[in-house]
Amino acid sequence: MNLASASPWHGKGLRIDVTTGVTTVAAVPPDVSRAYLGGRGLGAYMLLAERVFEIEPLAPQNPLIFAPGPLTGTGAPAAGRYSVSARSPLTGTIFDGNSGGGWGNALKHLGYDYLHVTGRCATPSYLLIGGGGSELRPAAALWGLDVPDTLARLRELHPKCEAAVIGPAGERGVLFASIVNNRGRSVGRGGLGAVMGAKNIKAIVLAGDGGWRPHPADKERFDFVVYEATKMLKSNPITSQGLPEFGTAVLVNVLNQAGALPTRNFRESVFELAEQISGETLRRDHTTKRAACRGCSIGCARRTATAGESGDGPEYETIWALGASCGIGDLTAIVEANYACNRAGMDTITTGATIACAMELTEIGALKGGPRFGDASAMRELVDAVASRDGFGDELAQGSLRFAAAHGHPELAMQVKGLELPAYDPRGMKGQGLAYATSNRGGCHLRANMLYPEILGIPKMIDRFATLGKAGLLINMQNLACVLDSLSLCKFTALAMKEDYYARLLSAVSGETVEPQELLRIGERIWTVERLFNLAAGFSAVDDTLPPRLLNEPVAAGPAKGHVVDLAPMLAEYYICRGWNAAGVPSRPKLEALGVAGLAEAAGVEAQ
């Protein structure tokens, strides 16, 4: 692919050390753009190549890498996205988060493929970047403001700007603090907001315009593929009806009926009050209108309201984390706790899962005076306590693994590699257990979600209780997720579109033919680089596991009754399909085939 004339890549990034104030413009070699695309892929490459695995996550040297993708801002469906990458303070793994909103488009318009921020400001500051350069400005008047007030104040100071900000949780080092941009879109998981707070940076503001506009190399072809792709999204029943009508919260009843809705810290997999917190109830009692990321025709987001508040969400994962996971069926309390997390800039999944862990510790007598399952008032109070790191909330701000270990029961933290599991009980969908165990950023459904083939039948229904024969499908999904996060496109588009459409979009923009299998090979390269980072950071096959409860405690009742996750044979099959050895290390032939053997050697990972 000839990148010299390709419009998706600028071939340069902006590097800022906020300790010294030194700003440099660095070239992005064309072969790197081709091999890693942008977004998540470019971030992974830079984190490994710069040996960030040797840096403590909250140290000034841990970079925050903001990167749009080659399709960001081009007009491709649901392509107004960007990634943020760093080493996570919650997990210690390589980490990236992906967000919608207008921030990614704005960075692309300024003419950069990435923004790389290191160092620590001497006092609270915000970073202002425009067509004329960048500067640090005092943020004392912003420090302490919540997310909506910060965004509003920055819009007053810099009309029409796009800002990525942290709230009080990020300022105070909550290990699952998020980064939020205009329209309330979040880089939610893994504590990247805490990394930003450790740098004394309240906001990164993009103001002005560098003059870039998308100019597809083959505009006629690009417009046709966009037309086709949009038509597919509008004809698919999930992307045209299910998600627009009910949002992701429609999954509450779906997962509950399948016996895969984790309840009371994964002690059960069916919640008797699921109907009270379902997407249908949310739509009836609280939803005021649909919302969407910029350039998205799906519109899965929601504006909601209670008697005294209004705001964005909650999504399915949030309803589960603050609801079923805590044994709570009070939807109003869940909605308002979600608003509080949004204001503080805090990941709702880890927030709810950590509170649920505390509730179980209380139930078994390991935590005196703690919250109990079903206590909506206690849950709501703890959300505020975590955000302010006040009293008991200061302990919870470390996440469930550290909290449970401090109270003598690390096994009660429902996490993988330190990241709390989301809202799918793998005892009721076994492939999801393998997805959690092998995820490079820890327990996550966004690396690959087996919900689609195991519950929804997309692209086809497979036996959700089967153990073997799923590794190949999971790997394909993981590789495709890497591609989508690197192009930067919404993953929901994959419900209606196949990889050939993504290849055709990139081909039309760049002017060079990109085959679907080439894209998937790029995804495999990105996944492997992330694995190499974690291996260099000290993770191993021992960490590719699940909480003991999911491996050893059969579900007591419901459609998944009697099931546990038989992980070992699935993991062995997965390693073989990946071309890794029994210790989970990529083989030398695999590294050479992907063109990353040199990176592995430089990182000190010995392939066999």
Image (spheres, rainbow, N blue to C red):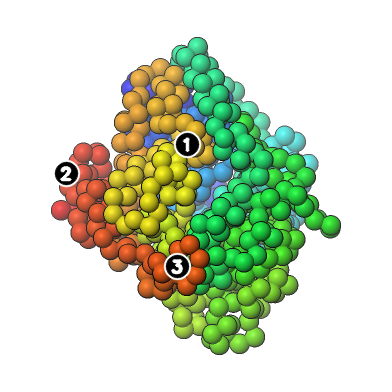
- Residue occupying the point 34% across, 42% down: 476
Q: Identify which residue, 141 or 593, lies in the foreground.
A: 593
- Which residue, given by chain and number where applicable, does mark 3 sit on? 561
Where residue 466 appears, as percent x and y from the top left, is 34, 56
Where residue 353 appears, as percent x and y from the top left, is 56, 67
- Which residue, given by chain and number where applicable, does mark 1 sit on? 494
Where residue 331 appears, as percent x and y from the top left, is 71, 61
- Residue occupying the point 25% across, 54% down: 573
* Marker disc for residue 589: 2
Quadrant containing the N terminus is top left
User: For residue 106, what is the image quadrant?
Assistant: top right
Q: Inspect the image, locate mark 2, and give the three-letter code of the amino acid beneath it.
A: Pro
Residue most toward the right? 307
- Under circle 2, the secondary element is helix
User: For residue 275, what is the image quadrant?
Assistant: bottom right
On the picture, is 390 further left or further right than 431?
right
* Marker disc for residue 331: none
On the picture, is 400 further left or further right than 46?
right
- Under circle 1, the secondary element is helix
**Circles 3 and 1: CB atoms closer than 8 Å:** no
Q: Inspect the image, locate mark 1, and give the three-letter code of the amino acid beneath it.
A: Ala
- Residue occupying the point 63% across, 28% down: 209
- Under circle 3, the secondary element is loop
